[in-house]
Amino acid sequence: MKKFAIAIHGGAESIKPSELDKEKEEKYREGLTVALQAGYKVLEKGGTAIDAVEAAVMTMEENPVFNAGRGSSLTQRGEVEFDAAIMDGKTLRAGATGATRYVKHPISLAKVILQKCDHALLIGTGAEEFALRQKLELMDPEYFVTPEKDQAWRDKQQEGLKKKHEKMGSMADTVGAVALDMDGNLAAATSTGGLTDKMKGRVGDSPIIGGGTYANNEVCAVSCTGEGEVIMRGVVAHEVYAMLKYAGESLQAAAEKALHLHDDLLQGDKGLIAMDTEGNAAFAYNTGFMKRGYQEAEGEPFIALWEKEDQNYKSIGKAKKAKS
Ligand code: ASP
């Protein structure tokens, strides 16, 4: 069978095991499994990396447990605002969108921008009008607001959050995917509701090409999560590419070094997934916790949340051999 692989993330956060209840943990694992399967199925049938990353991300946008599409974090005004990007490593075309409020699947809007628009980044009402013209599904704003996020917003209000730019909540579970298809094409996708209690009009790293999302068939595909302001200033996704291409690092080392570059100046939660031209994946995060998954052709699915679970990731190769 020809080589193909997909890796996904559902966001990195600084939390301890005692802060996550079992039920939520289970929901994360289920959501990641569904997303991984959706992307894997596309690749298994010979579909493109672009379609695979879109399919995986769409399932997480529909799943209220993640901070993308339905279930997104709310702005200071108690509204949702989505950012998303998708990049095709073969053509280096990208589609990105910021601060939209009604499109059910921001990642699909990013994809139609990539495919049908002369521009690479469309924001706000212009992006929504384009989505309408492209007949994408729009939803009432109520659809996106879950009771949990609504409560989090109310709690913030009570805290008198007017204290400027206080540490912005921990409910930031951006989603993303990177994939290699049977034809050797790489793609990356990222979708998010952004940081809890962000200002209206704030756009994070996810739709910044080279910041939170990047793909290039020559080298790798990358999707980031964490504090967008820090990640975009570190141009983290493109740094992974640069570490591999120009510094000759291994994939995991490139991911770690890009993540920690200028750590003194760029402090904050950071995480990323990366995939190379062979379909190997790297996971790097400074939070101890990142929702993530991986599956390669005929391999076992790998789903993990906590850092210690990465031991299992390294044994994927063995699991594969034992099966054949
Ligand atoms: N990177 C996202 C943003 O800053 C948030 C996250 O990944 O949790 O918008």
Image (cartoon, rainbow, N blue to C red):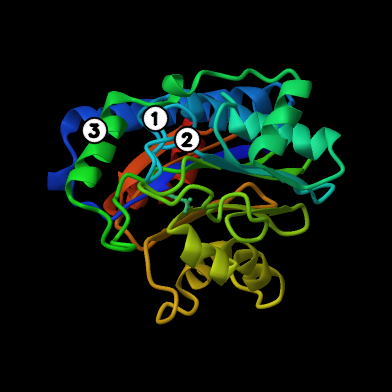
Say if 112 sits above or below 143 in the image. Answer: below
Say if 152 sits above or below 210 in the image. Answer: above
Q: Return the residue at label 3.
A: 151
Whether residue 226 appears in this view of the structure is yes
Mark 2 and mark 3 in contact? Answer it, CB < 8 Å: no
Q: Earlier in the sequence, mark 1 or mark 3?
A: 1
Q: Return the residue at label 2.
A: 68
Q: Amino acid at mark 2?
A: Ala
Mark 1 and mark 2 in contact? Answer it, CB < 8 Å: yes
* C-alpha span from label 1 to label 2: 6 Å
**Who's the residue at 84% across and 33% down the image?**
116
Whether residue 2 appears in this view of the structure is no
Measured as percent of width and height from the top left, residue 78 is found at 37, 37
Q: Return the residue at label 1.
A: 71
Measured as percent of width and height from the top left, residue 288 is found at 29, 57
- How many numbered circles does the render carry? 3
